[in-house]
Amino acid sequence: MMRELETSLKNLQTDYLDLYQAHWVCDDDVLDEVLAPGGALEALRKAKEQGKVRHYGITMHRHHKAIRRAIESGLFETIMLAYNALDEEGVGPDLIPLAAERDMGVIIMKPLSGGRLVSPPGSAKPDGLDPVVAGTLREITTNPSITTVIPGMVSTEEVDQNYRAVTTAHAFDDAARRRLFETIASLKKELRYGQLCLGCGYCLPCTEEIEIPKVFRALYMHQSYPEDQRSMGRELYDSLGMPADACVECKECMERCPAGIDIPERMKEAVAAFGRRAA
Ligand code: SF4
Ligand code: SF4
């Protein structure tokens, strides 16, 4: 870590950095290494004592148990997490508020889902702002638990648009949230099977009390996460009070889904992926 820091200082031609983060601490084993005697945390502390960094933090993906451990350790001043309205890594409901409660700086990466959350080229952009980008950035920056966001920008025009999006004084209320999800749904971005679940929760309540968005999240993790993290999908699925096989195909949820997902069919996919279990 100290060697990496010296390289960064040299390349950036500076004596100190405002913030330095241990990047991609992806699971419990890597976190153990960071925290161990002689590990990265020791170097970060030393660098702060020497005035080479002013603050230090950690960046993490997906692994909720390790993320919670890092937050609850109280050892880091910031945490960088991947989050946007789709919340593909599931950190929105609990982990981001927990970090804020612990007075950590919460930095959001991947706010535009690696470039998926943008309108198609050539679409009309009222006031010059891309409604998907602007809505997504507003949803993030109006969250009181979030400190800042780091969208990638490739031109001064994008810098200008992002700046205007987050400084425009529109409240991000329920109507704006629904508009954003409807706009994203209209993009009809395909995932592995049909339409992507947006995690918006408008399909609820299910008549059989199935937690539909969580079933989709478990399925997504099971199908799309790196090999060594796929078991998290099953863990989430097994933790649900009502399994997907409880679906009676009433289709009431479908009428409320802005993404037009054939929910009962996808429940069958979840059953095929995770097997049947008693409710
Ligand atoms: S179709 Fe299935 S998932 Fe949708 S409300 Fe009915 S029982 Fe629930
Ligand atoms: S199934 Fe549809 S309504 Fe339900 S969370 Fe997913 S996108 Fe939203």
Image: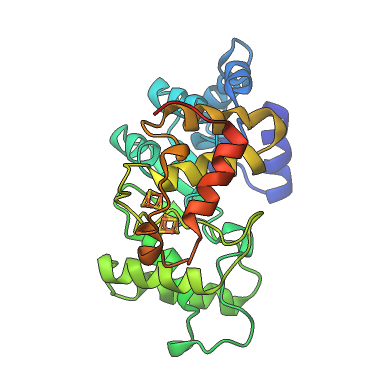
Q: 156 or 115: nearer the eye?
A: 115
Foreground residue among 259 and 135: 259
Q: Quadrant of residue 121?
A: bottom right
Q: Quadrant of ligand 2?
A: bottom left
Residue 87, horizontal then vertical, whole percent: 47, 50
Residue pictured at 57% horizontal, 31% vertical:
275
Residue at 39% across, 36% down: 95
Image coordinates of residue 162 in percent, x first then y, are 49, 72
Q: In the image shown, does 127 or 272 lie closer to the viewer?
A: 272
**Residue 84 horizontal/vertical position (percent):** 47, 55
Residue 178: x and y, percent?
34, 68
- Residue at image position (32%, 60%) is 142
Q: Is residue 26 above or below residue 167?
A: above
Q: Residue at x 37, y 66 (%)?
A: 255
The image quadrant where one finds the N terminus is top right
Q: Tell me if I can see residue 61 in this picture.
A: no
